[in-house]
Image (cartoon, rainbow, N blue to C red):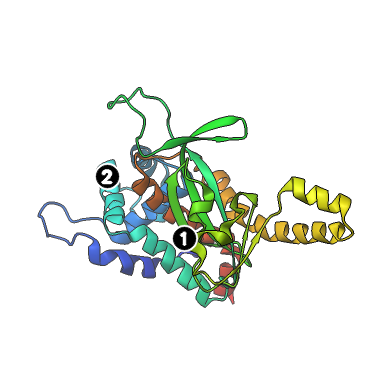
């Protein structure tokens, strides 16, 4: 990832908002690239601010990656790491990081934008009330999936149908219906959008009337079985659904990366804004992770 991330572009994005040396007195601030590298390490290894501080002292590889001297005693503490994250949140820089990464990938022909796959995933939040406020996060809600109740938020994503790379992210409470966010997950350049059965009727909604795309929504299993059994064209319809399913499965790849590779299965902060900002960064990094071999081959060439 050290060779895959375009560090100079991201540092140029953040630097105008970062504190300058001597602005408020005291010790000089750490370099923007150092703090950005530490921030990315947190996402890759699912580390909290205090744990990240400890890891910098305990893990030489982390210090080397962040560009910190092996014998340096003055390492960034958890407050410094926290302030950098707040800087990203205050200036909406996480969303811009995702946009910058995607612009680079699009320029290399890795993000084609001719089709989009939409989906949503649940991310759990602590349901306990044993905290300082005595209540659960008011911006998180519970929803029922199958026979099980879940408390937390939803990450709604729009994914490039060709590459499986995420181009759009929307964070909502868990009880928000997937269908209501479909219009926000298209970028406007695609001609086709693919979705599962939870998006039935999306083309008839008011907010999608001005979106000129072909909606390919999965047929409900009961209806599909009835067609295959009772009509001559049932077998053809079944094959068509299989083709649509092979396209839709692309949306599962980035979700697997952030949940299994990066370990992001629970929200880390209170409130939707902070957790959605983290999702922007996670999906930007998942995009780079998914095409890392291609990017490395280009660099070698």
Quadrant assignment, res 292: bottom right
Residue 236 appears left or right of 186: right
Q: Which mark is residue 184?
A: 1
Residue 132 appears left or right of 208: left
Quadrant placement of the C terminus: bottom right
Classify mark 1: helix, strand or loop. helix
- Extreme residue toward the right, this view: 232
Q: Is residue 220 visible?
A: yes
The relative height of residue 48 versus residue 213 in the rendered view (above or below) is above
- Extreme residue toward the top, this view: 130
Classify mark 2: helix, strand or loop. loop
Q: Residues within 10 Å of mark 1 (few under 14, many from 20)?
A: some
Q: Which mark is residue 76?
A: none
The relative height of residue 230 versus residue 138 in the rendered view (above or below) is below
Pointer 2 residue: 73
Residue at horizontal 33 percent and vertical 60 percent from the top: 93
Residue at horizontal 50 percent and vertical 65 percent from the top: 4
Total marks drawn? Answer: 2
Percent from the top left, x then y, of residue 217? 65, 58
């Amino acid at each position: 990832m050290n060779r895959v991330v375009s560090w100079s572009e991201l540092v140029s994005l953040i630097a105008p908002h970062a504190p300058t040396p001597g602005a408020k007195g005291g010790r000089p601030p750490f370099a923007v690239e150092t703090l950005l590298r530490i921030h990315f390490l947190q996402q890759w290894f699912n580390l909290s601010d205090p744990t990240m501080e400890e890891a910098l002292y305990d893990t030489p590889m982390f210090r080397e990656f962040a560009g910190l001297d092996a014998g340096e005693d003055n390492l960034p503490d958890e407050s410094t790491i926290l302030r950098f994250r707040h800087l990203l949140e205050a200036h909406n820089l996480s969303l811009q990081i995702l946009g910058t990464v995607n612009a680079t990938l699009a320029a290399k022909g890795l993000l084609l934008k001719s089709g989009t796959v939409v989906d949503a995933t649940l991310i759990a939040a602590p349901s306990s009330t044993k905290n300082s406020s005595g209540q659960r996060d008011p911006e998180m809600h519970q929803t029922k999936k199958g026979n099980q109740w879940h408390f937390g938020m939803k990450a709604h994503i729009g994914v490039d149908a060709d590459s499986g790379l995420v181009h759009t992210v929307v964070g909502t409470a868990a009880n928000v219906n997937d269908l209501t966010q479909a219009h926000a997950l298209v970028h406007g350049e695609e001609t086709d959008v693919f979705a599962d059965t939870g998006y039935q009727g999306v083309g008839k909604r008011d907010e999608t009337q001005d979106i000129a795309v072909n909606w390919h929504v999965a047929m409900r299993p009961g209806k599909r079985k009835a067609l295959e059994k009772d009509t001559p064209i049932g077998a053809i319809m079944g094959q068509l659904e299989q083709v649509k399913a092979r396209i839709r499965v692309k949306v599962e790849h980035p979700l697997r990366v952030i949940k299994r590779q990066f370990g992001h299965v629970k929200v880390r902060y209170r409130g939707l804004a902070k957790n959605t900002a983290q999702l922007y960064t996670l999906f930007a990094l998942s995009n780079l992770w998914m095409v890392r071999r291609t990017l490395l081959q280009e660099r070698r060439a």
